Amino acid sequence: MRSRAFCAKAAGLALDKVTFHLLPSGGGFGRRLPGFWNFLTYAVKTAMSVPDVPVKLVFTREQEMQHDFYRPNVTSRFRAAVNQDGMPVAWVNDYTTDEDPNPEAHIFYTVPNQAYGTAKVRAYVPTGPWRSVAASWHGFFVESFLDELAHEAKKDPLEYRRALLQEKPRHLATLNLAAEKAGWGAPLPAGRGRGIAIFECFGTIVVDVAEVEVTDAGTVKVHRFTSAADSGMVVNPDGFRAQVESAVIFGLSAALYGEITIGHGAVEQQNFTDYEVVRLAETPEIEVHFHESDAPLGGAGEPGIPPVAPAVVNAIFAASGARIRELPVKKHPLAASAGRG
């Protein structure tokens, strides 16, 4: 109904003069949500310019990539106070947003003193939803910073998280499941490291363990990804597994390569020749495991994204000693860091 009303307004017609045929299509990842319907305007105007014949309007890859709604530019600053054991007793997070404050910034770890601040920054580039929305960047921010705290405390990243999740049995059980299935702590070849990250959004907890190699040339190879998820009861295991697997590939593409740049007022990327994504040869071995609980049913399509990027950058640190605090990874020369993990 809302799409039909939008088309009627674009055409300057009464609602009863418009028939809207809803057709199935593939994943839109936020592109088809209300407020981002410029493609409907183009379709209506095109159809009205050639009356009495049906019109099918299809954007080329170049047109869509250069006239889209983009993931917002965001940044986050953290401060923490720790006790004599290196565990956080105060957590302060200030971050930017292009919308209202993000509840996804709030941590589930047991830290007695927490404070959050946000600054709304005007975006001059059209921005829109991205798979897992604000959880995607807060997952990267929070889990990367927590890994840094563990390192400063000279503690194992897994054990550090376990200590902070003693009051969260679902989170702890899912964390333990992922660590066990990934073989956390087992020896790895030189130049490889494991990274771990956990996040909860849309009612589902997901833990990722990434096994990453940083070569002497500074290239990054993700060899293995182990995911564990708790969405309450798993209604469709095959469907849920497919969602998590796709989230890993989707998240890896963004973490390793995803970047839109503006030059002379226009988007510079046009197609997959200059906007890289993870290809089949780069796709790691992916394992997905479920921890079922009596929690209310959670989502499946969005929650797999947030822990992907932090698991990867935490593994890069374990392999090379290089901290990645800005994505994508491709922007950072790693050759000088290789072998220092």
Image (cartoon, rainbow, N blue to C red):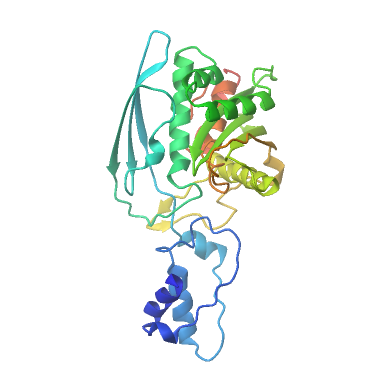
- For residue 88, which quarter of the picture? top left
User: Considering depth in this image, is 276 or 304 the residue closer to the camera?
Assistant: 304
Which quarter of the figure has residue 152? Answer: top left
Q: Quadrant of the C terminus?
A: top right
Q: Is residue 96 above or below residue 321?
A: below
Residue at figure coordinates x 45%, y 62% from the top left: 67
Q: Is residue 290 visible?
A: yes
Query: In this orientation, which residue lies closer to the viewer: 17 or 35?
Result: 17
Where does the image place residue 329, in percent across and percent down from the top left?
Answer: 52, 36
In the rendered image, residue 254, in percent from the top left (x then y), is placed at 54, 44
Q: Foreground: 107 or 97?
A: 107
120 is higher (above) or lower (below) than 125: above
Q: Is residue 280 above or below residue 41?
A: above
Pinpoint residue 277: horizontal percent, then vertical percent. Answer: 60, 47
Name the residue at 36% across, 42% down: 102
Tell me the residue at 57%/78% (across/down): 56
The N terminus sits in image quarter: bottom left
Task: Report the residue at 44% width, 56% height from top.
Answer: 267
Q: Is 67 situated left or right of 319 in this image?
A: left
